[in-house]
Image (spheres, rainbow, N blue to C red):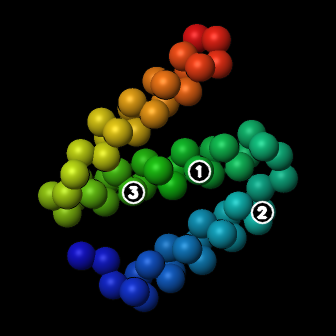
């Protein structure tokens, strides 16, 4: 279970990383890292299988964009 303080700290961390990113490629990398972090946390917490959802979204993105 995530506390409100943890949520605030997480938001502060990712917002700072996004603000520091200077290109779309860097911002995409930050969001990719953030999504992987959420999936790992959900896995540790015994929550839903976010890895499967992340995989499906990435695969769909790939297919929609010429892959």
Per the image, the residue denoted by label 3 is: 38
Quadrant of residue 41 within the rendered picture: bottom left
Element carrying mark 3:
helix
Q: Nearer the viewer, residue 23 or 4?
A: 4
- The residue at the far front in this view is 64
Classify residue 44 by image quadrant. bottom left
- Look at discs 1 and 2 and give the one toward the viewer: 1
Furthest-right residue in this view: 22
Q: Position of residue 36 (x, y in %)?
A: 43, 48
Q: Which residue is drawn at 64% across and 19% down?
A: 65
Which residue of the protein is positioned furthest toward the left in this rendering? 46
Disc 3 to disc 1, C-alpha distance: 11 Å
* Residue at the spot of label 1: 31
Left or right of 33 on screen, residue 17 = right
Who comes first in sequence, dot 1 or dot 2?
A: 2
Label 1 and label 2: CA atoms lie apart by: 13 Å
Q: Residue at x 41, y 81 (%)?
A: 6
């Amino acid at each position: 279970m995530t506390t409100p303080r943890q949520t605030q700290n997480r938001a502060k961390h990712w917002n700072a990383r996004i603000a520091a990113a200077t290109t779309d490629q860097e911002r995409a990398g930050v969001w990719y890292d953030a999504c992987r972090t959420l999936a790992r946390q959900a896995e540790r917490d015994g929550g839903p299988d976010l890895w499967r959802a992340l995989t499906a979204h990435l695969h769909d993105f790939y297919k929609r964009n010429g892959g």
